Structure formats: C-alpha cells, structure tokens
Image (cartoon, rainbow, N blue to C red):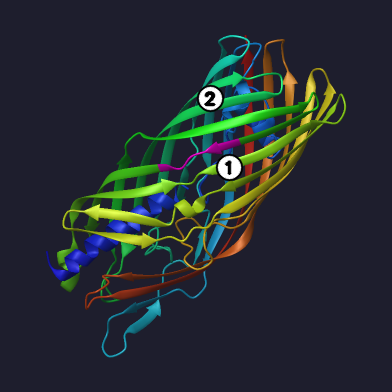
Amino acid sequence: MSLSRTSLAAGVALAALVVASQASAAAFYLQEQSVRGAGRAYSGEVADRGAASLWWNPASIAGLDKNEIYGGVHLVQVDSQVDDDGSTLTRPVIPGGLTTSVGGDHIAGGPINNGIVPNLAGAFRINDKLAVGLTVAAPYNFTTDYNGNSWTRYDALKSSLLTVDVNGTVAYRVNDKLDLGVGVSAQYTDAELSSALPNLSPALPDGASSLKGEGNWDYGWNVGAQFHATPALTIGASYRSKIEHELDGKVVVSGLLGPLAGGNISTDGVAKITTPWMANLGARWKVDDKTTLNASISRIGWSEFDQIVVSYPGGGSISEQNYEDTTTAAFGIDYEVNPKLTLRGGVQYDPTPTPNVGRTARVPDGDRTLYAFGSTWQATDAIQWDAAVSYISFKDSKINRIDTFYAGTPAATRLNLQGDVGGSAVVLSTGLRWSF
C-alpha cells in the first residue's frame, strides 16, 4: 500500500468510527425511558416504584403487590441550525499552502433528525419480598444528516447510531425500610457514517468515505437501593456500569483523484468504544395527601469516552476525545387533583460533555435546560395512562475542530472547522401502565 493509501485508510476509519462513539454517548444519550418520569423532568425516578422506574433503579420493583407492564413512546422533534463561521481548508501547495473557504452551503438547517423512542418494561411478583423485571430500551440513538454540499461535509454528512438495550432485574425487599436490586444489561449497537474527502485541487470534485458497522451484544450491570426513611420520604440511589463496545464495519473510500487515487479502498475495520457509567441519587417527599416533591442529581462518567481505538488490516490509530464527566440536576412536583387525575411538572439542567475545543458537526451539542409537564389518568382499576410534553432549550455553542487529512504524507490537508450551533426540541410522550 502506498504512503497516501495507508494514511487514507487510517484517516477514514478513524473519522467514521469517531462518529459512532459520539453518536452513541451524553451528547447523544436519550433519557426518555419513562413517560411518567418525562412529566416531572426525570426528577423522581430513582426513588419511585414500579416497572416504569426500572431503567433508573432496579430496586424500584421490590415488594410489589401486583405484576406490572409498562409501555411508552416518545416523539422527539428537533429544531436546529448549524452555521459556518469562517471554516477553511489548507491544501499542500508550495511554498506555504493554499488556504480557501470550505465553500458549499454556509447554513445547515435541521441537521438533527426527529425520531421516535419506544420503551417497554415488565415487573413480576414472585412473593411478598422478591420480584423480577425486564426492560427493553433505546438509550443511545442519534442521527444527523447534512446535504452533500454542506460546509460540514468534510467533518460530517450522515451520522446514524442505533442501540437496543435489554436489561434483566432481580429485586428484594430486605425489610420495611430497605429495598435492593441488581440487573444485567445486554446492549447491541449499529452505525452508519459518511463524510466527504478533499482532493488536492479546489477545482476537483470531492471524494467520499463511508462506514457501515455492526456491534455484538456487549454487557454491563446495574445496582440500586431505596431507603424508606418515613412513610412520606423515600431516598433512592443507583449505579449503571459503563459498557465496552466493539464495532465491526466496512470502510469504503472513493472518488480520490491524481496522486490520491491510490487511497481509494474497501476494507474491514474494527473500533472499540465505551459508553459512560451513570450514578443517580434522588428523593421523593410526600408533603401532604396531594403533593409530592421530587429531586435528583446524576453524575455521568463521560470521561470513559476518552479515546477511540481503531484497528484494520495493516495498521491502527487512536483518537483522543476528551469528553468530560457531567452532573445533571432536576426538580419536580406531583399533584393529585383527585383519585383519577395526577398532574406533574419539573425542570432539569443537563450540561454537555463535549469539549469546547474539538466539538464536531457530527454531534452539535450544547448545555440543555428541560421544562416538562405531564399527567396520569387512572382509566380503570388496572390501567393508568401517562402523558407528557417537554421543551428542551439548547444553549448556543461553537463547533471548533481541527483535523488533518492524509497526515504524515506530502498530501497533508488541514481542515479548520468553525461554526455556530443553536436549537431547541419538543418531546411528546404517551404510555400505559397495566397492573394485574
């Protein structure tokens, strides 16, 4: 393989697989795992009871009186815009290089796709103390899609990540004060990623790179506890482990011309990535017969996503990511209007783990504030209908990333990507809980 071909294989495999990890971790974590929880901005789930809280705390089903089935769906509608702010490309033209604008469309409207997030959970009573549970969730799902002439094209065109998480749980009521739970999580990942590659002359059309990757079933664990300090106050804590993933994929490079033509390849590649751990602490306090206050704080271990390790026939590479651990805080309230109707609301602050220097157009993320309102209708003695609406405001942020194509060769081309990001989202949620 020629020098340029070797460099291209490394660069394309790395660029594509970096997306898979970024599209699967906080910048891309979906917390929409409970419709009841969505209505109070996820402020009380770790301390609440029932199948709908299983994602947040495996102890939530200990000592249940009845079996429970929960099903929910969340419609995520995103309004986003990513604008060029002077991005440039420097090609290796003697003596000092030729720096030009990246060109293309300088405004990218709506790159973050809308989506539907389903979830399902069941809790089954063994006896007065013991229960088992099962959840099926999609915690890491994300798609960004730019047109082929976007100013972001050398960093990102399409980035699509899908995960499926199946979690089995066992919970035990130690006594009237303490519940414990433990679970094992199996998680599957699938990714599709693409971007453009610059040829050596601005007069030539772009090349292209793409990756379609499939993971295996990889495993993690979770533990939790609930302490019922008084009949009115419950404190909950839980921990969900990181999961190490290995993605197998096909890297394809095409459309490179002249001295770069030897870099057109089709080869297998493997990337190893790690999704973060999560630690949750929260409480629910029943102030009176109608009002319950909820509060929670979560620490998310995004620093586990510190690098991407890529290997392929004949070589490999490591890309530093420098994600930072984050702390999310939420507060909410439940109010029982009457025995049939409960209203709830909440607010949450969720900072981004992405670094200010190095943020990519693949996951154009910023700090978020979530405002939520929801309700539960007791339709029958056995069925409860939950509904919620959430508004998410994204703090304006910057894309600020420098990459070098064909690094270490005479064809080295430097991309300086600079952009402005803004947006908001609305999430509509509905679900049913059935006890029997």
Look at the picture and state if 127 lies above or below 421: above
Q: Which of marks 2 and 1 is nearer the N terminus?
A: 2
Q: Do the residues labelled 2 and 1 touch (CB within 8 Å)?
A: no
Q: Is mark 2 on a helix, strand or loop?
A: strand
Main secondary structure of the magenta stretch: strand
Where are the magenta residues, as a range? 238-243
Q: Residue 385 location in percent, x, y?
A: 68, 21
The residue sitting at the right extreme is 288
Q: Residue 254 location in percent, x, y?
A: 22, 59
Q: Can residue 71 be seen in this view?
A: yes
Q: Label 1 amino acid? A: Ala
Q: Can residue 255 be seen in this view?
A: no
Say few, some or many: other residues with alpha carbon within 10 Å of mark 2 (under 14 / 14 to 19 / 20 or more): many
Look at the picture and state if 358 lies above or below 253: below
Say few, some or many: other residues with alpha carbon within 10 Å of mark 1 (under 14 / 14 to 19 / 20 or more): some
Q: Is mark 1 on a helix, strand or loop?
A: strand
Q: Where on the picture, by quarter, is residue 36?
A: top right
Which residue is identified by label 1? 279
Q: Residue 142 location in percent, x, y?
A: 47, 46
The verdict on residue 353 being magenta is: no
Which residue is identified by label 2? 120
Query: Can you tell which of label 2 and label 1 is closer to the viewer?
Result: 1
**Most foreground residue, 396 or 14:** 14
Q: In which quarter of the image is the C terminus?
A: top right
Residue pictured at 35% horizontal, 51% vertical: 193
Q: Residue 231 location in percent, x, y?
A: 80, 23
**Residue 172 numbered tag:** none
